[in-house]
Image: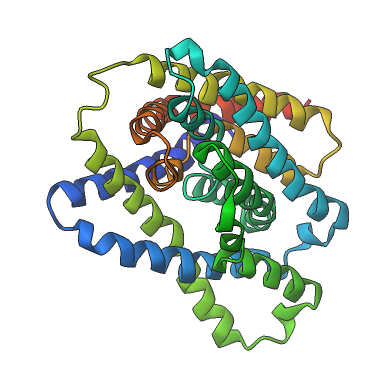
Amino acid sequence: MVDSSAILCAVLPVYLIIGTGWFLRRTHFLSRAADATLLSLTINVLTPCLALDSMLGNRALQNVGATLSAPFLGMGSILFGMAVCFVLAPLAGLKKGPEQRTFAVSAGIYNWSYLALPVVLALYGKETVGVLFVYNLGLEITLWTVAIMVISGGAPGQSWRRLFNPPVLAILTSLILNLLHGENWIPRPLLSANHMLGTCAFPLGLMLVGATLYDHTRTGIFRGSVRTGLLGCVLRVGILPLGMLALAHALPLTPELKAVLLVQAAMPSAVFPILMAQHYGGSPVTALRVVLATSIAGIVTIPFWVRLGQVWLMR
């Protein structure tokens, strides 16, 4: 079991890097014009490199049962989260339609990647990060199908094509190379270069998150109502983590998969639903309120849930 100081040491750097992105945007060192290029670089190059580095030679992924069940747990976790948040959204005074649908997606989906990655890596190591990528495969599928259908209020349309993106393809390729023991025959210089690129993924991603949050904190989005952010916190970093930890406790999962569920349960809302709301006819203001409120609360709630989860799951 990891002690409380180690958990805090794993969480604080995440927020410090987010704060760095916030500061760089405020001081104009990181301009909005650079966002699209840096985001594309992070998603299409650095994250696939990190996936390969984490999954190649990963003994935890040689457990076929765990590898097959991980994506389904990812799917189920956000389907359940969105359903609960959709039903309870009226408690925040949200109207039926875009506001309710956006709340369901933004409060129901946790930050599965840029916040979870460094915490998993710091607390549990590279093998568990590999399991995290496979777990996230199911989440990605649900994101580009059901989540888009919910937030848009209609059919997902052509969004299913986005499933075939570089991170997803990298995960599938890495699984195959792991089965073929690619770590033994891929040239070492290539593996070393891939490792160096992969380590850049989450710092750059977190700085972009910080820059995005800075942009939105200047809009005064909390002046109208705090109920949306408050209910988002109650659900996303309050009630839903308890359900995910209960699931991890009840199911016969590998230690690596339990660790992934534990960390994901502790995460605040993902930033991506803000962009989804803007593009698919949702309510961006609703998403912003939920993301900002849960991200701020996460400074306290992430260590709390990780520590509680470790005590509970180690019984």
In this view of the protein, can residue 129 be seen by the observer? Answer: yes
Estimate the x, y position of residue 254 in percent, counting from the top left.
81, 44
What scheme was used to colour the molecule? rainbow
Residue 266 falls in which quadrant of the image? top right
Q: Residue at x 56, y 61 (%)?
A: 162
Q: Residue at x 40, y 55 (%)?
A: 205
Residue 169 falls in which quadrant of the image? bottom right
Q: Nearer the viewer, residue 163 or 258?
A: 163
Q: Residue at x 33, y 16 (%)?
A: 226
103 left or right of 314?
left
Question: Quick one: quadrant of the N terminus?
Answer: top right
In this view of the protein, can residue 314 be seen by the observer? Answer: no
Question: Quick one: quadrant of the C terminus?
Answer: top right
Residue most toward the left? 27
How many numbered circles does the render carry? 0
Estimate the x, y position of residue 267 in percent, counting from the top left.
52, 35
268 left or right of 291?
right
Decide: is 50 above or below 295.
below
Decide: is 286 above or below 203.
above
190 left or right of 205?
right
Estimate the x, y position of residue 134 in percent, counting from the top left.
69, 56
Q: Nearer the viewer, residue 105 or 268?
A: 105
Estimate the x, y position of residue 71 in percent, counting from the top left.
73, 50
Q: Residue at x 37, y 44 (%)?
A: 278
